Amino acid sequence: MNFRKALSLGRGFAGVNEIEFNSARTILDFDAVFIDTAGLVEGNGKHPHAIQFRREEFSEFLALGRTIVVFTAPVRLEVFLPITAVGVKPISGNRVDFKGPDHLKVFWESVRGDTQFMAHFTSALGQDFLYVSATNKSVGTMVRQERGHILFLPWPKIHGHGPSYQEICSRFVTAFRKLDEHLPPKKQTVTFPAWSTHYGWEREHQLRTNLTSLQVQADDLSKKIITTTSDLEIEDKLKVLFTGKGEPLVETVISVLVELGAKAVPGEPGRDDIVVEFEGKHAVVEVKGKKSSAAEADAAQLEKWVAGFKEQNGTDPKGILLIDAYCETPLNERIEPAFPNQMLKYSTQREHCLATTTQLLGLLLEARVHPEKRVDLVNTLFSTIGVYTQFADWETFLIALPTAPTPAKKN
């Protein structure tokens, strides 16, 4: 589409034409429409005749391959727009995660600092690409309708009509122009009168029905890709258990213990790494990632945390030392023991459990496959004195994937 000029409904937008929702002025003179849904409710959007007139115009507008931008508020969107009923609930904030195609990412990076969300979708509508940070609450989605698009977005931060208002509007219009170049149709199309939509033939009707079905399938597939990508990111983080050290390793151990049903929280700064409660039992956990093996100093540090917990709480906790030994060495090249003999006597006398974080991963994977064994599996950490022997062979629960082939060089 050759974007020339835009129109705003519901709120003034600097540098963009504005018309009243219930006026007779057509939107078909324009290439894009910006709709402030809250402004429509507060203004004249409730007039039944105006609503019907605009809904019909929006349908024709989309059939021409044009774009409607909706700044979403918690209102009944289907009242104004030619869409099926969709759930929208109020929520406000600024932190947003993006998951979507590159052309939308470029657009969003240009305007994200100027926006705030005021609502989120509770039911599927289109291709979601903006989410309340660290959640699955959608606050931005793209809907393909006929040959056009409806783009649901957070609100621009527009207050008053000062210089910042002008700048925000200008940035948004500039970014939208670039985005609109990537939205089909790109070629100029023949314009048909509105009454032509009331006539057709069998093949045309069947193709239109098939296209609608394919678009629904494409939207579903896009959602599945986003969900699968998110799930894969969560699984990938578990690889920290055999590659990491420092805070990321501690955080991953906590997330694993929580998934296993334990209450696991970071210790106070300068004290134990993790404090654990499981089935009425307590443990303090020292977590380390090391280029070499564990050492007696690591066990001594753990024993210090054990003594501190007992002094503060009056109960004896289990001391668990979790080490990602040889963390910079591939698993198949780790041939030296993670816990050398010289530290075993010290730890055994103090009834420590000595395990690698790779073994903890094995325990988690086993509990996922056999959830009925979860409690017994976790209890093995509490009952072990000395070196933990379960899941010692990583090849019993991890897969050594083949290396991807190197692309052939072109002559």
Image: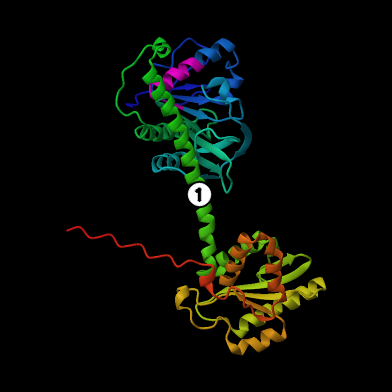
Residue, disc 1:
228
Q: Is residue 403 above or below residue 65?
A: below
* Residue drawn at point x = 59 percent, y = 89 percent: 341
Q: Residue at x 50, y 59 (%)?
A: 236
Left or right? Give the position of 262 relative to 50.
right
**Is residue 180 highlighted in magenta?**
no
Asked if one can make out residue 220 in the rendered structure from this viewpoint, the answer is: yes
The image position of residue 8, as x and y in percent, is 47, 22
Q: Magenta part mainly helix, strand or loop? A: helix
**Quarter placement of the C terminus:** bottom left
The vertical placement of 226 against 10, above or below, is: below
Up-down relation of residue 1 to residue 274 (above or below): above
**Residue 223 as seen in the image, left or right of residue 86:** left
Q: Residue 85, how many percent across, how many down?
A: 58, 26
Q: Residues within 10 Å of mark 1 (few under 14, many from 20)?
A: few
Location of residue 161 in the rendering, given as x and y in whole percent from the top left corner: 51, 27
Q: What residue is drawn where x is 39% and y is 14%?
A: 200
Q: Residue furthest front?
A: 202
Q: If the image is split into quadrants, where does the N terminus sit?
A: top left
Q: Which region shows up in magenta? A: 55-68
* Residue 143 in the image, given as x and y percentages of width and height: 47, 31
Depth check: 206 or 263 in front?
206
Task: Inspect the image, locate mark 1, and give the three-letter code of the amino acid beneath it.
Answer: Thr
In the drawing, does residue 233 fall left or right of residue 30? right
Residue lying at the far left of the rendered structure: 411
Q: Nearer the viewer, residue 123 or 395?
A: 395
On whether residue 57 falls in the magenta region, the answer is yes
